[in-house]
Amino acid sequence: MKRVGIIGVGEYLPKKVLTNADLEKMVDTSDEWIITRTGIKERRLAASNEATSDLAGKAAQAALENARLKSADIDLIIVATTTPDAPFPSVACFLQTLIGAKKAVCFDVSAACAGFVYAISIAYQFISRGAYKNALVVGSEVLSRVTDYQDRNTCVLFGDGAGAVVLSEVKSGGILSIYLGSDGANADLLKIPAGGSRHPASQETIDNRLHYIKMQGNELFKLAVTIMTQVAQTALKDAGLECKDIDLVIPHQANMRIIMAMAKKLGLVAEKIYLNIEKYGNMSSASTAVALCEAVKQGRIKKGDIVLLDAFGAGLVWGACVIKW
Ligand code: ACO
């Protein structure tokens, strides 16, 4: 088995900013409620001519440059997304053409907010067994297209963005453990009811606003805290490590209170948690991806550091990954 690590990172955030003050004009909410209940101050919105693959393309280019690789060096592209450009073809295939990675094998992964960790786990399998050399893994979302800006329960939470990493064989460190899990029995807690084979688009689904995110936030909140804590503990145990060994946690950025409750249960001080929820809100699969990229670029992650990715989302799905940088 080859040792696999992240050799390049890159992110892209659309320029347009949607602030809490903007949302106050759209629904019955307040800056104070949003900040105290979620920790979010603003989020980014893709331009009307930007689709998920466009965001992915910019993040991917940045990651390739950072890895000092050319697109022709990429053997595998996996895009984690819940908001593909279209039901098919995959975002990964659009991305392949955008960046000119002609020899790459391309597909998408649907695992909501844990999608980036799921995609990393797949790339890890291929590279560690020697099937492929270099993989591009991207978390990219344009959640603003499936967010109901008439529903205050959800519209304050979500934003758009993309983060990309290049995985390859490394001489030291790299991925130490990956732990994934799913619970389809709780699928109803967070979903987009229509637009698929169960409820194809119709006048009725449009009139009933069924193409937008529906969420039972309170139930999810409790599950997120419990599961994200357990997932972190299991991934660390699998890596032969303990919480005290962690240098930085990159958690899914769904809610500041979820992250802080998890940190408390794990006995981690705030300095060991990377947060960007204030600037971007919840970007589903792009949240952990963008946070990881930013943390590397800001020097919060240095060679030899132990980094824990920890994500949870619709499905339900969850996943954690321990990496020695
Ligand atoms: N502004 C003002 N009031 C609001 C707003 C708002 N934007 N949204 C809800 N409220 C109200 C509710 O209507 C409710 O009022 P009521 O008591 O009169 O009925 C009150 O605030 C409390 O609502 P709760 O839902 O209990 O609020 P809570 O503290 O749970 O916070 C939140 C809601 C932020 C959604 C939280 O539950 C949460 O973050 N849940 C987890 C989300 C998550 O982890 N999702 C999974 C990952 S995301 C993915 O996979 C795409």
Image: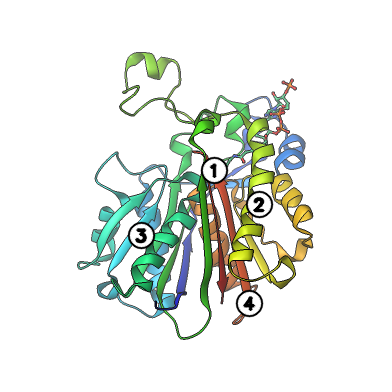
Between disc 3 and disc 1, whose residue precedes?
Answer: 3
Q: Amino acid at mark 4?
A: Asp
Instruction: Name the residue tied to disc 1.
Output: 313
Q: Is residue 134 left or right of residue 162?
A: left
User: Given contact means CB atoms under 8 Å apart, are the residues at marks 3 and 4 in contact?
Assistant: no
Cβ(mark 1) to ligand 1 < 8 Å? yes
Whole-number angstrom distance, CA of label 4 to CA of label 1: 26 Å
Residue 235 in which image quadrant: bottom right
Answer yes or no: do the residues labelled 3 and 1 have beta carbons within 8 Å? no
Furthest residue in direction bottom, as rendered: 171
Disc 3 vs disc 2: Cβ atoms closer than 8 Å? no
Q: From the viewer's perspective, is residue 313 above or below residue 308?
A: above
Q: Which residue is mark 2?
A: 230
Q: Residue at x 47, y 70 (%)?
A: 9
Name the residue tied to disc 4.
Answer: 305
**C-alpha gap between disc 2 and disc 4:** 22 Å
Q: CA distance from mark 3 to mark 1?
A: 24 Å
